Amino acid sequence: MGRIPRAYLMNRIVTLLLTIWIAATLIWIIPRLSPVDPADIMLGRMAAGAGAVENADQILEQLKENFGLNDPLVVQYVKYITNVITFDFGLSTASFPTPVASLVAKALPWTIGLMLLSITITFFIGNILGALMVWEKSPKLVKVAIPAAMVFTSIPPILSGLLLMWIFAAKLRWFPLTGSYGLTVEPGWSWSFVQSVIHHGFLPALAIVIVTFGFWALGMRGLMITVQGEDYVTLAKAKGLRPRYILYKYMIRNAILPQITAFALKIGLLVAGQVLVERIFAYNGMGKLLYDAILDQDFPVIQGVSYVIILMTALAVFLVDLLYPFIDPRIQHEGG
């Protein structure tokens, strides 16, 4: 593993597994605190569709048996943890008998694509703007325009999405109102499909970007102010190095590390923020899936989506922690 000591690596792996286990346990406990019974929900849907259900008591007992609700809680928990390891989250109650794993598998690529696009754009734009707010060579217009643009960060993502939808989709008709790709386009690895995905995903990504870049800009601004007064920056200026070289090599590189940590932690929060954005744009990601599952009280889907989000965040933090010494050679892991 290069500069990563084995003892430290094992410690981080144990911490990662412990975090995932605690999160999975909480996901299992919280729905069971609700008085709502998944079997009752399914029976209610059957009654709503048919008007009446014969032998309702027997059907209810059979549904509870199918969902394992008649087992003792300890048995339910052991089965749940065993199944979660293999990403088996059971069957959806709203789309019975569709497995939750298949629903998550269909939605996950869309969410990852939208998330990586939006968070990458906001990370680079936000950090660059934050650095320019502090850099003494920045034009005055830039220093005035950037804080003014950060007004958008106070807008909730759902409102920014509605505003963008009204301007660019309803009025200008530059982008489609809803959907992940065109109905006339055949999904596959073709240029026409890729174009359609980018065209449909632009507004949802932009809705997230304009309300989150301020987080990075403000964070970077504070870090740059701290770095600006360091001795090595003063020495670089005394040597007569170019201001842009000092900005990148001595200031941004030394201020960016805490932002990289925040990048990993932001993944879970960003997915949560995408929920309503994906819903209003009818974007087929996990945000929309989670929103619909909450409305339908589909607990297996809620558990599956929540677990995947937590897993993604925990893995991102784990990888960033291991990569720190490669990003900044001054940092050494314990025992290194």
Image (cartoon, rainbow, N blue to C red):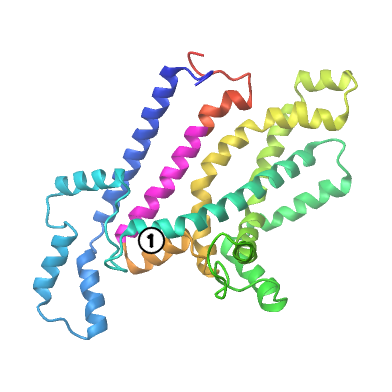
Q: Position of residue 168 (x, y in %)?
A: 69, 71
| View extreme (top): residue | 335
> Can residue 317 be found in the magenta stretch?
yes
How many labels, in total?
Answer: 1
Q: Position of residue 192 (x, y in %)?
A: 63, 66
Position of residue 14 relative to residue 49, above or below, is above
Measuring 43% from the left and 23% from the top, which residue is drawn there?
Answer: 9
Mark 1 is on which residue type? Leu
Mark 1 crowdedness (10 Å alpha carbons): few <14, some 14-19, many ≥20? some
Considering depth in this image, is 230 or 117 the residue closer to the camera? 117
Identify the residue position indicated by label 1 in the image.
103
Left or right, 42 with respect to 203, comes to left
Position of residue 229 relative to residue 285, above or below, is above
Measuring 84% from the left and 33% from the top, which residue is drawn there?
Answer: 244
Measuring 74% from the left and 42% from the top, which residue is drawn there?
Answer: 128
Q: Does any portion of residue 44 appear in the rendered image?
A: yes
Q: Which residues are magenta?
A: 299-319
Left or right, 140 with respect to 170, comes to right
Q: Does any portion of residue 160 appear in the rendered image?
A: no
Considering depth in this image, is 95 or 74 the residue closer to the camera? 95
Q: Position of residue 109 (x, y in %)?
A: 49, 55
Measuring 27% from the left and 61% from the top, which residue is drawn there?
Answer: 91
> Can residue 190 be found in the magenta stretch?
no
* Image quarter of residue 204: bottom right
* Image quarter of residue 290: bottom left
| View extreme (bottom): residue | 51
Main secondary structure found in the magenta portion: helix
Q: Position of residue 195 (x, y in %)?
A: 64, 64
* Image quarter of residue 48: bottom left
Mark 1 falls on what kind of element? helix
